[in-house]
Amino acid sequence: MQYIEIIIAAVSAVLGGVIGYLSYKLLLKNKVKNILKEATSEAEAIKKDKMLEVKEKFVNLKSEYEKQVAARNAKMQQNESRIQQKELSLNQRQGDLQRKMNELEATRENLDNQLQALDEKRRDLERSQKQVTDQLAAVSGLSPEEAKAQLVESLKEKAKTDAMAYVNEMMEEAKMTANKEAKRIIVQTIQRVATETAIENSVTVFNIESDEVKGRIIGREGRNIRALEAATGVEIIVDDTPEAIVLSGFDPVRREIARLALHQLVVDGRIHPARIEEVVAKTRKQVEEEIVEVGKRTTIDLGIHGLHPELIRLVGKMKYRSSYGQNLLQHARETANLCAIMAAELGLNPQKAKRAGLLHDIGKVPDDQPELPHAILGMNLAEKYKEKPDVCNAIGSHHDEVEMTSLLAPIVQVCDAISGARPGARREIVEAYIKRLNDLENIALSYPGVLKTYAIQAGRELRVIVGADKVDDKTVETLSYDIAKKIQDEMTYPGQVKITVIRETRAVSYAK
């Protein structure tokens, strides 16, 4: 009986667990259905929101696209109206051109008629001249050849004077017409290039804080200054000039090395021969690196590419070289810019012209010193480092040492003269200046009938006074032309020289 109760209790417990499990499962199923229903409703709401957003974005994109299409249509309308205006302008120009061609055709016909009339008049004149010649021969008893010889002899002086006047007139007309465009190009080129003027001397002044430093630089029994001069190759002048030491030498690179080394020694304070040699060697290396850097920076500034490294080093070396007081690197940069502008104005290659202008004076800074003109030496260097033939020819012919073979050569020659002859560019030595004035006066004095000559305006004008009893008015123009031609052939000078021949007659009487 007891066992039966236990079994019934167990069965009841199992049935209660099964019923609880089934009820929990049923409840869970209902909960899942509710969750799915809520998720479905929420998904429908999200779908509706997204559809609304998509529709709104579509409307916005559609309106923006319509605006773009409207703007594009408006732009196309403007282009069409502009094209129509251009077509109208071209039609009008075509009509004007046709009208001008008709006028030219009419003018040509008139000229042909005038030429025919002139030919007829010329034939009439020849017939009349033959009749007059026959009559003169009959009256004078001379043959036509003899009469012609006398006539030619009598009119020779007049023909010479008329020819000279005609030559002067034609030269003036040529200057008025042919040089007008050249002057415009040259003036525009000069105005578009702004340069600085740098004056270099053969000495460099090194400033010091006090005169006590001079004794340390000289050293015991002068050993320091001797070591410094031997290491740099520059003469060091220590005199009574307060707070200054003069470095003298014709090589500006050596002077710069000496100045930088001396500055480092003074700042460091240790001045003795071993230290001097060490500092000078280090400074020389720094200057060489700076030369290469200056060459690279110059080519980059000018937009020149593909130069040989040795040519770049020579360009940088120009910084320490001067010509008649004008810094050579500044002159080369100025010439390069002038060449580029002038070549562009003339329709040539400006890059090639700029390259030739930069390299035209590299013959002045070679490592060795051969006995050659700097233009020939520069041309040889350019050929050695594979420059173009027309660039090499422009370098070699800018002082007329070799014949010019391209239009690039006269451009480099003209721009070199512009850069060197402009006011303030160069400092002329007094002796050379005086010699040039004397040569001008002596050339004019070599002609017969010249009494006095005066070179004025720094040699830009030459006044020639001739004797009234030795030179007549007809010969004055010939004499002026001959003197100008001889000066042009025998002398070298910047710019131009104006020759003025003066002939006067003076009547002097004395009242007693």
Image (cartoon, helix red, strand yellow):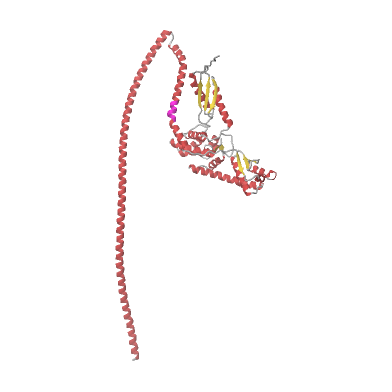
Q: Residue at x 33, y 83 (%)?
A: 14
Question: Residue 218 is drawn in which quadrant?
Answer: top right
Query: In the rendered image, is residue 151 in sight?
Result: yes
Q: Residue at x 58, y 46 (%)?
A: 286
Q: Outermost residue toward the front?
A: 512
Q: Quadrant of the N terminus?
A: bottom left
Question: Residue 134 is drawn in which quadrant?
Answer: top left
Placement of 240 over or under 46, stated as above or below: above
Q: Residue at x 58, y 31 (%)?
A: 430
Q: Could you tell me residue 453's position as x and y percent?
A: 54, 24
Q: Could you tell me residue 197's position as x and y percent?
A: 53, 38
The stretch of residues the image draws in magenta is 172-179
Q: Residue at x 31, y 67 (%)?
A: 42
Q: Could you tell me residue 104's position as x and y percent?
A: 33, 28
Q: Could you tell me residue 498's position as x and y percent?
A: 50, 27
Q: Outermost residue toward the right?
A: 221
The residue lying toward the viewer, choosing from 134 and 213, is: 213
Query: In the rendered image, is residue 342 in sight?
Result: no
Placement of 440 over or under 353, stated as above or below: above
The residue lying toward the viewer, choosing from 171 and 16, is: 171
Provide the major secondary structure of the magenta segment.
Answer: helix
Question: Residue 234 is drawn in which quadrant?
Answer: top right
The residue lying toward the viewer, choosing from 230 and 15, is: 230
Q: Residue 170 colored magenta? A: no
The residue lying toward the viewer, choosing from 381 and 129, is: 129
Q: How many marks?
A: 0
Q: Quadrant of the C terminus?
A: top right
Residue 214 falls left or right of residue 37: right
